[in-house]
Amino acid sequence: MSRSRSTLSGLTLGTLALAAFALGACDSWPTTWPWAKSDAAAPSQQAAAPAPTSGLENIAPQAGTPAGAPTTTAPPTTSVVAAPMAPPPVRDEAVPAAPAAGMVWIPGNWNFSGATWAWVPGRYETPPRPTAQWIPGHWTAEQGGGGVWVWVSGRWTG
C-alpha cells in the first residue's frame, strides 16, 4: 500500500484507530457539545436506543426464480398412482371468486385410493412466478393397453 493511501490529511489510519479506541473507552460524555446549537441532553441522559438488529427482520421471503434468471419447465412426471379402470367423468365445479389478486384456479380431479375413486375439489394457488401458467393433471390410459390408467401430475410452466 502506498503512503498516500495510508494517510488522511497527515494522520495515519493507526492514529485514527487509536483515537477511536480511546474515545470509545471513555465512560463519561460531555454535558454539552461545543458545536451543538441546542441544549441537547448528553447521550447518557437520553432514552435508551433500541437494540441493534441484523437487518433481516423486515426482508420478506422470495419465491420463484430471480428476475433475469433462465427458467426451465420439467417434463410432466407420471406418479405411481395407477388404476385398473378409467376414472369417472370430471365434475363441473363452480369456480369461486379468487381470495386474492393473482391467484390461479387449480381444477379438481379424481383420486384413486386402490379400491375406490374420490373427488379432490379444486383450489386456488399462488403461481411461483407472475408469468407461470398451470397445466392441469390428468388420467391417461397406459400405452400398450391392459386397461391401466395412470395419473400425470399437474405442473407450473412459463
Image (spheres, rainbow, N blue to C red):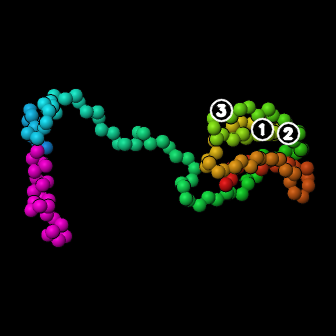
Q: Specify the quadrant of the image occupied by residue 44.
A: top left
The picture places residue 43, in percent across and down from the top left corner, at: 16, 33
The picture places residue 101, in percent across and down from the top left corner, at: 63, 38
Is residue 79 or residue 45 the one in the foreground?
A: 45
Q: The residue under label 2 is which amino acid type?
A: Val
Tell which circle, 3 or 2, labels the residue nearer the N-terminal end.
2
Mark carried by residue 116: none
The local secondary structure at tag 2 comes to loop
Q: Which residue is mark 1?
A: 108
Task: Give the distance between the C-alpha atoms of the residues marked 2 and 1, in whole angstroms.
Answer: 8 Å
Dots 2, 1 in contact, CB < 8 A: yes
Q: Which residue is mark 2?
A: 90
Is residue 105 or residue 73 the one in the foreground?
A: 105
The local secondary structure at tag 3 comes to loop
Question: Crowding at label 3, few (<14), some or many (≥20) Cα neighbours within 10 Å?
Answer: few
Tell which circle, 2 or 1, labels the residue nearer the N-terminal end.
2
Q: Which residues are magenta?
A: 1-23
Is there any visible trace of residue 27 in the rendered image?
Answer: no
Q: Residue at x 89, y 39 (%)?
A: 89
Q: Residue at x 48, y 42 (%)?
A: 60
Dots 3, 2 in contact, CB < 8 A: no
Up-down relation of residue 11 to residue 89 (above or below): below
Task: Give the distance between the C-alpha atoms of the residues marked 3 and 2, in whole angstroms.
Answer: 24 Å
In this picture, residue 8 sits left or right of residue 75: left
Q: The residue under label 1 is which amino acid type?
A: Gly
Q: Quadrant of the N terminus?
A: bottom left
Q: Which residue is mark 3?
A: 99
